[in-house]
Image: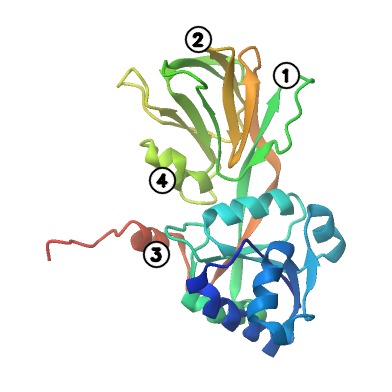
């Protein structure tokens, strides 16, 4: 078996967990492929395994190396970064949470060894997550990453005034949102930016998008869930010449004359779920459902 480890610099408090994880992989004779940003942590804190792992740094490297799984060390942001590298290769992802609130990286770092053993022994299932793609009608502007696992968001730039987002579904007019911006999220992204703006939580695997306004001027405007086979077109009006559009953590400055077309991406991301993980349990733990602090 070949497993790729992806992440950034390992926090000091997580170094013992990183060492235990690496030792579990070596003990089970797993071939390790290490993202180049993790190599300094390995070299400094695991000198006995300095030459054990092959390094990778790009999407092309993953295509060439073709690991069986990619294990992300970090938070949900790290997983979103890994998606831009995995793209349509079909390599399954398992997230080990070294951060704080993690819905995607939902394996606690102290359980990393158990989760890796489950992975090696085949005690897991694969959940496929839909993505959303963003296309623009301006061929002079290059979009480095036109897909998102969480959401596509448009927002104002260089102004405190609201923008107006005209939204169309399959070319049928839906609404004009007077707001700070608009989010179009996948079920995976429903627990992210959309949730913080009052959007609903959607079960992973649902074939939906949710359209969530950011601080709308009209209080009767609410998030709207639609089937994800529909296409969404957005036109922006602003007092400024430009607005911001983001695909997960990638942000682009676009002129207000630019139209966006949002639709379901042609590929899915595979997420590993081991036997002791499930989405309702993650919600209860992360959102503290069922806990009464008064008692």
Please state which of residues 39 and 138 is positioned toward the viewer in this rendering.
Answer: 39
Residue 53 image offset from top left, x and y in percent:
77, 76
Using the numbered discs, state the Cα–Cα distance from disc 4 to disc 1 in whole angstroms: 31 Å
Please state which of residues 40 and 147 is positioned toward the viewer in this rendering.
Answer: 40
Which quadrant is the N terminus positioned in? Answer: bottom right
Residue 269 image offset from top left, x and y in percent:
66, 53
Using the numbered discs, state the Cα–Cα distance from disc 2 to disc 1 in whole angstroms: 21 Å
Q: Which residue is mark 4?
A: 201
Upstream in the sequence, badge 3 or badge 2?
2
Q: Residues within 10 Å of mark 1 (few under 14, many from 20)?
A: few
Upstream in the sequence, badge 2 or badge 4?
4
- Residue ranking furthest to the left: 294
Q: Which residue is mark 2?
A: 239
Mark 3 or 2, closer to the camera: 2
Image position of 244 with respect to 268: above or below: above
Q: Which residue is mark 3?
A: 281
Circles 1, 3 touching at the beta carbon (< 8 Å): no
Please state which of residues 129 and 70 is positioned toward the viewer in this rendering.
Answer: 70
Q: Which residue is mark 1?
A: 137
Residue 11 image offset from top left, x and y in percent:
53, 67
Residue 68 image offset from top left, x and y in percent:
75, 69
Q: Is residue 187 visible?
A: no
Image position of 19 with respect to 274: above or below: below
């Amino acid at each position: 078996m070949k497993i790729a480890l992806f992440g950034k610099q390992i926090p000091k408090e997580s170094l013992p967990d990183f060492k235990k994880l690496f030792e579990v992989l070596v003990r089970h004779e797993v071939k390790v492929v290490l993202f180049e940003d993790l190599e300094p942590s390995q070299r400094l804190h695991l000198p006995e395994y300095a030459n054990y792992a092959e390094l990778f740094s790009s999407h092309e490297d993953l295509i060439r190396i073709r690991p069986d799984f990619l294990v992300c060390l970090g938070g949900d942001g790290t997983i979103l970064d890994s998606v831009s590298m995995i793209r349509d290769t079909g390599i399954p992802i398992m997230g080990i949470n070294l951060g704080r609130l993690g819905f995607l990286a939902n394996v606690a770092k102290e359980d990393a060894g158990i989760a890796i053993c489950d992975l090696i022994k085949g005690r897991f299932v694969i959940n496929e997550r839909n993505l959303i793609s963003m296309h623009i009608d301006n061929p002079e502007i290059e979009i480095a990453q036109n897909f998102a696992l969480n959401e596509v968001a448009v927002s104002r730039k260089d102004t405190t005034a609201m923008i107006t987002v005209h939204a169309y579904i399959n070319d049928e007019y839906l609404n004009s949102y007077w707001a700070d911006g608009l989010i179009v999220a996948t079920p995976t992204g429903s627990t992210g930016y959309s949730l913080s703006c009052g959007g609903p939580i959607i079960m992973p695997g649902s074939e939906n998008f949710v359209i969530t306004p950011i601080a709308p001027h009209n209080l009767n405007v609410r998030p709207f869930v639609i089937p994800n086979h529909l296409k969404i077109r957005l036109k922006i009006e602003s007092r400024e010449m430009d607005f911001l559009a983001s695909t997960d953590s990638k942000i682009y400055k676009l002129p207000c004359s630019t139209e966006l077309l949002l639709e379901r991406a042609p590929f899915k991301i595979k997420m590993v779920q081991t036997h002791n993980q499930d989405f309702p349990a993650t919600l209860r733990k992360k959102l503290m459902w069922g806990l009464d602090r008064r008692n």
